[in-house]
Image: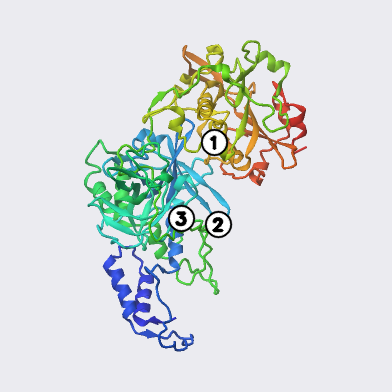
Amino acid sequence: MKLSAEFLADAEERLSNTAHAPSPPQRRRARRAQVDAAVPVDLPGIAAAAPVAAGEVEERSIGPDDMVDMSFLERALVAGRPVCRIVVELHGASEFATGFMVSPRVMMTNQHVLPTADRAERARAEFDLRIDGAMQMHSGVPFAFRPDLFYASDKALDVAFVAVAAESIRGGRRLTEFGHHRLFAAPRKIEPGDAITIIQHPRGEPRKIALRENRLLAFLDDDRLLYGSDTASGSSGAPAFSDDFQVVALHRAGRAARKDGGYLLLDGTVVASLRGIDESRVDWEANEGVRISAICRYVTERLGHDSDHDNGNELLEELKSAMAHGGDVISQLQQGLTAEPLRGLATGVAQRQPSALGAATALTPGAVLDLPLRVQVSLATTPSVASGQVAVASPDVVTGAFAEKYVSPRIDTDYTNRRGFDTKFLGRTVGLPRLTPAGKALAATMDGRTRVDYEHFSVVLHRERRMAIYTASNVDWIKEHRFGELTRKDLTGLKDGEIEKWVSDPRLPAAWQLPDTFYTKDRKSFDKGHLVRRDDVCWGATTEEVIRANGDSFHVTNCSPQRSDFNRSAEDDRAWGDLENLIQHGVTRCCVFSGPVFDDVDPEFEGRDEVGPTRVQIPSRYWKVVVEQADDGSLRSYAFILRQDLTDVQMEELDVPAVWKTRRIKIAALEAELALLKFTAAVRAADVLG
């Protein structure tokens, strides 16, 4: 290969430049023209290539020139560190989005993701959620938001800023480890036809990067631009970068193709509204982002002058200082620094890479760096764009709305059609646990029976502790048995601005049940934790059956007070939700038994029910037993016991990875912990631990 002397000189100047300032599109185009027109020179020590035959050329770009320096990958890795997944929990349901740090303590995302300070207080940011070069999962480092220190938003621009706690929820990690991106006020850092790179958490998945074929399509106005790129629900709030890894836009939405006054689907159908339409069926023509120059104007001209839009002058000044003076991860990379924001590029520890002479080389040209980067590349010539959380072109599209009104979901009050747990579900008998004499004395009874049946599951209730002694459910994840096009709104019948209110079971005395009031007036102490997971039982031969199972899961008899960091998946590797995900991805059909461990020393919580003040002992441990059928027809059972304060890891398979083996327990040992019940001989005999 031959390079021009002018190009080499320009490259040397760029590599030695310590300032991370905008590189205008005119300069980039001039640089490319300079390379194309320059006279080639031979590099020392490299033999000249043989002359090519007439009519041949040494190389040609096919279509747009998508070649970039390998340093692009190093910069992409570093640029991903300030990017986080945002998790908003809405009473058992998780909403995902993306955000990124724009100063040492302030994060930016969309206003529709965190529309209020109260919503931000109930969400969290997870950094370093990724799959590394060895294909190992990094489960993420959770941080709480601190809207009490700083929160500002603008609905018109669809931008929100919020302070992040300085230390992680678990593990003592510092926020400064992840660094921030600088926001440049220059209005045209990119031109139509230039490439755009988006680092994001689509669908709440580990961090991904959308590469070529992604181009800026047009400037809509002074505030917005359109580009072709691969995104998905959960990508809202992601940074869109130029090739120099300057942030040029805040990703906010997908734009659906229009036809005849309606919205075009991929099959050619035109619909009047996208409400309830699966995003994979929509013909998305582009994505829309908010221009960083517009956001910078908002910060400099409005914040600090409008008390309705911001609070916390100290962090506002920090944000303005970061915009003006840098200190961002890309600037530090260009300066060859390995400061704390760059810590952990490969193993979680900041290091300079030693050279052959033993000197520190940092991230300068020639340094060798192991890159734990998983690149997702789109090679489509015509952009195929999935939606973000909002389809801008449709004002009535569901925006991943954050509901505030409690409404009971659809519930079939004719309970005579409930068959409950099926002991023959796996083809071999898996019987219900048998209550011990102590268990029988405390179990709630209905018509002389302790078993309360619902669609695909049953509950045995502790009438004094007012929650389940155990639940038993039939779980079916066979695709043909699930109605994939039914959304949660289809199942519940709720409208925008409404979330599920849990209901008491009219078949049992109210005094034996903890009502929804206990959880809504608990000073935000607990989540409403499903013992039987809603998704696990939402299957059936008819939509009515699925809707019935969904509604049944919102009976308070199936509810338990669980702290948020225990109940919610993807925050805690020992969390209840993570174990539920493990089961979903590892087993197609199974029987699941679960419940709390009732200890006499469980702490009492002073709360309120529908009568007035009440004191409730809160279980600190929960158990789960999974019974599946092996390929040879035999049964296998797995028992787990979890505490409410265990640490983070995200699991994917039910061959029980090493991190979960520490939480395994023999069935017999679990029975010793559960004074109120015993498992059947078939379940004990199937225990894989012997």
Of discs 1 and 3, which sits in the foreground? Answer: 1
Q: Is residue 466 visible?
A: no
Q: Total of numbered circles in the picture?
A: 3
Residue at the image position 44 percent from the left and 89 percent from the top: 51
The x and y percentages for residue 476 are 60, 35
Residue at the image position 37 percent from the left and 33 percent from the top: 118
> In whole angstroms, how far apart are the C-alphas of marks 1 and 2?
41 Å
Q: Which residue is mark 3?
A: 340
Sequence-wise, the earlier of marks 2 and 3 is 3
Left or right of 319? Residue 370 is right
Q: Secondary structure at mark 3?
A: helix
Q: Which residue is mark 1?
A: 482
Sequence-wise, the earlier of marks 1 and 3 is 3
Residue at the image position 25 percent from the left and 52 percent from the top: 220
Q: Which residue is mark 2?
A: 347
Q: Quadrant of residue 451?
A: top right
